[in-house]
Image: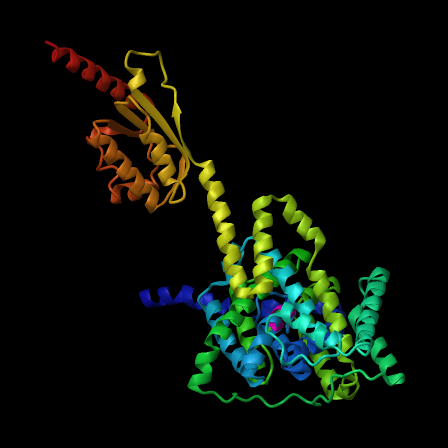
């Protein structure tokens, strides 16, 4: 019986990570809206899937496979009712150096490895971890990704092969500009500018129009009709490949462990952030963060088996899905089916799309990620937030995305601890009641805020530096938090004062703090158990009695 009781909650938690009928509650009423939203987001996703596949180095085919397979699996198994998943710009930024270092074949292996890691993170319930990432870090990370995506498109925009360049996007962009054949490079640049102009114009006319899709169609038609010498996507398969396990070796797995961990961390962070944003756009149900990780892990795993890329939740496509009226997961499923239809009947048409046109779409997408209004908001929120944003942005562009997140977290934690430390203090208070002789030798300190490793030494110094004191009353009732460092510092403070002959009285230990102070010896360091008080008046009376006995003792010792 006890075993069944123990298994009950565990089984219930596992069920929460799996699909259920509740995922499609109300579908009879919403299927039309889901159908329209799914077709709309499928059209929007097509050029992005192609562009992200090409930009990563894995090819347009890998981008389409990822959007179809991962999009379908994540829709069914994920924790959001409206999340749309597939290849994203952030993932491209991580994958491009992996392709350069290990070849295209490594992409599927990394996708499978990262999928297993993300799946495990969901099973052990790490979904809420993203809520601990501060807003300036997220915005700096997003803006940095936008800058990198933009720079990664420079080689295609100037008609230069993207291979043989530095893995750093800034350096690679300058290398491509230097290698470009001028004035021939003006032709692909013109295609990029045409795509950008069409997207901007359509965006002003109506936000509901699939601007990137229309821009790709217009520029592609012009290129085909006028026979412009622009590099195109090229031949694409007319069906999905059969799933298979890529060739593996211990050496390959060892060399890809680091990249897989980075990809998994990025997939988890971006997917959970996208799902959280989707939940704020419309009332489409709560997000199950742990189930979202399970779904995204399975999505990348499935994508890798079909030869695709790691997948994440896509904020832009998810926003289009919600704004198009999506209510259930059916819309994301239909999005994948629309892309599958393209593979079956329209690959010969898609093959004629100029690479420069795809670069134009990605450059516009990247430009929207670097929001000036967001930068102004971060700047207005304070110098520390601006510093966290700027450092995260710089490290993202100059070094590595995952390192940028950790450094951003470290910098944000430093400023948060500094602010918390400043709110903490040991303030000497006036003694209550009528003044009595000897009161000047009693020091009443009220410790406020948090007594933790960032503030402990400063507070101890404030108390020990009081001259001419024979009795110290430590009032702890206003102390909100204390950690092991703070409790140890308080214990050492009491011991040091007692050794100097100063009597220490402690008043108002909160029940939740008492075990910590007891274990680390702060209470035992008192001269007598009676020196622990719950009220201030008895503590003050006891302190004054000490002073009185001290004065009388001095009189008795006089000759």
Of the pair 267 and 511, the residue shown nearer to us: 267
Work out which residue is located at the far right of the displayed protein and give it. Answer: 226
Q: In which quarter of the view is residue 309 placed? A: bottom right
Using the image, determine if residue 117 lies above or below residue 440. below
Quadrant position of the C terminus in the picture: top left
Using the image, determine if residue 456 lies above or below residue 552. below
Using the image, determine if residue 234 lies above or below residue 552. below
Of the pair 239 and 461, the residue shown nearer to us: 461
User: In this picture, which residue range is highlighted in magenta?
Assistant: 88-92
Query: Picture coordinates of residue 195 (x, y %)?
Result: 81, 71
Q: In which quarter of the view is residue 321 placed? A: bottom right
Colour scheme employed for the rendering of this structure? rainbow
Query: Picture coordinates of residue 27 (x, y %)?
Result: 68, 68
In the picture provided, is 369 more to the left or to the right than 213?
left
Of the pair 48 and 284, the residue shown nearer to us: 48
Query: Picture coordinates of residue 391 (x, y %)?
Result: 57, 55
Q: What secondary structure do most residues of the magenta stretch adopt?
A: helix
In the picture provided, is 490 more to the left or to the right than 498?
right
Work out which residue is located at the far left of the displayed protein and give it. Answer: 559
Of the pair 200 and 79, the residue shown nearer to us: 200
| Residue 431 seen in this snapshot | yes
Quadrant position of the N terminus in the picture: bottom left
């Amino acid at each position: 019986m006890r075993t069944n009781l123990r298994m009950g909650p565990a089984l219930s938690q596992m069920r929460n990570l799996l699909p259920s009928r509740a995922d499609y509650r109300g579908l009879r009423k919403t299927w039309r809206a889901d159908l329209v939203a799914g077709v709309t987001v499928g059209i929007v996703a097509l050029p992005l899937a192609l562009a992200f596949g090409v930009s990563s180095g894995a090819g347009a085919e890998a981008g389409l496979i990822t959007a179809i397979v991962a999009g379908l699996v994540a829709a069914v198994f994920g924790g959001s009712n409206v999340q749309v998943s597939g290849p994203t710009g952030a993932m491209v930024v991580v994958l491009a150096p992996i392709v350069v270092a290990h070849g295209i074949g490594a992409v599927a292996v990394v996708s499978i490895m990262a999928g297993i890691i993300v799946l495990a993170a969901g099973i052990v319930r790490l979904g809420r971890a993203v809520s601990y990432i501060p807003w300036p870090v997220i915005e700096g990370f997003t803006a940095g990704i936008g800058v990198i995506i933009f720079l990664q498109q420079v080689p295609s925009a100037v008609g230069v092969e993207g291979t043989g360049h530095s893995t750093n996007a800034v350096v690679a962009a300058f290398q491509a500009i230097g290698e470009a054949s001028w004035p021939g490079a003006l032709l692909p640049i013109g295609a990029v500018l045409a795509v950008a102009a069409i997207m901007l114009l359509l965006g002003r006319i109506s936000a509901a129009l699939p601007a990137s899709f229309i821009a790709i169609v217009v520029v592609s038609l012009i290129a085909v009709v006028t026979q412009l010498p622009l590099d195109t996507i090229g031949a694409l398969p007319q069906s999905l490949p059969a799933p298979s396990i890529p060739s593996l070796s211990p050496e390959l797995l060892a060399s890809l462990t680091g990249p897989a961990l980075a990809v998994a961390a990025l997939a988890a962070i971006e997917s959970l952030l996208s799902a959280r944003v989707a939940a704020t756009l419309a009332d489409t149900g709560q997000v199950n963060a742990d189930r979202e990780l399970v779904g995204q892990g399975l999505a990348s795993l499935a994508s890798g088996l079909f030869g695709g890329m790691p997948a994440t939740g896509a904020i832009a496509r998810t926003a289009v899905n919600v704004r198009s009226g999506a209510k259930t997961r059916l819309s994301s499923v239909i999005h994948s089916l629309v892309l599958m239809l393209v593979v079956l009947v329209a690959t010969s048409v898609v093959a004629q799309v100029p690479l420069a046109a795809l670069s134009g779409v990605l450059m516009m997408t990247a430009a929207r990620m670097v929001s000036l209004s967001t930068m102004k908001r971060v700047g207005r929120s304070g110098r520390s937030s601006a510093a966290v944003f700027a450092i995260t942005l710089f490290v993202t562009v100059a070094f590595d995305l995952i390192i940028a997140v950790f450094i951003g977290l470290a910098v944000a934690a430093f400023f948060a601890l500094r602010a918390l430390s400043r709110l903490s203090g040991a303030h000497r208070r006036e003694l209550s009641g009528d003044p009595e002789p000897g009161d000047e030798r009693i020091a009443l300190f009220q410790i406020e805020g948090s007594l933790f490793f960032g503030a402990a030494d400063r507070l101890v110094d404030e108390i020990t530096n009081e001259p001419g004191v024979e009795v110290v009353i430590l009032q702890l009732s206003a102390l909100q938090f204390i950690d092991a460092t703070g409790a140890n510092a308080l214990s050492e403070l009491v011991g040091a004062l007692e050794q100097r002959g100063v009597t220490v009285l402690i008043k108002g230990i909160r029940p939740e703090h008492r075990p910590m102070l007891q274990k680390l010896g702060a209470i035992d360091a008192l001269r007598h158990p009676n020196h622990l008080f719950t009220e201030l008046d008895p503590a003050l009376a006891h302190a004054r009695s000490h002073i009185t006995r001290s004065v009388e003792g001095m009189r008795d010792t006089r000759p």
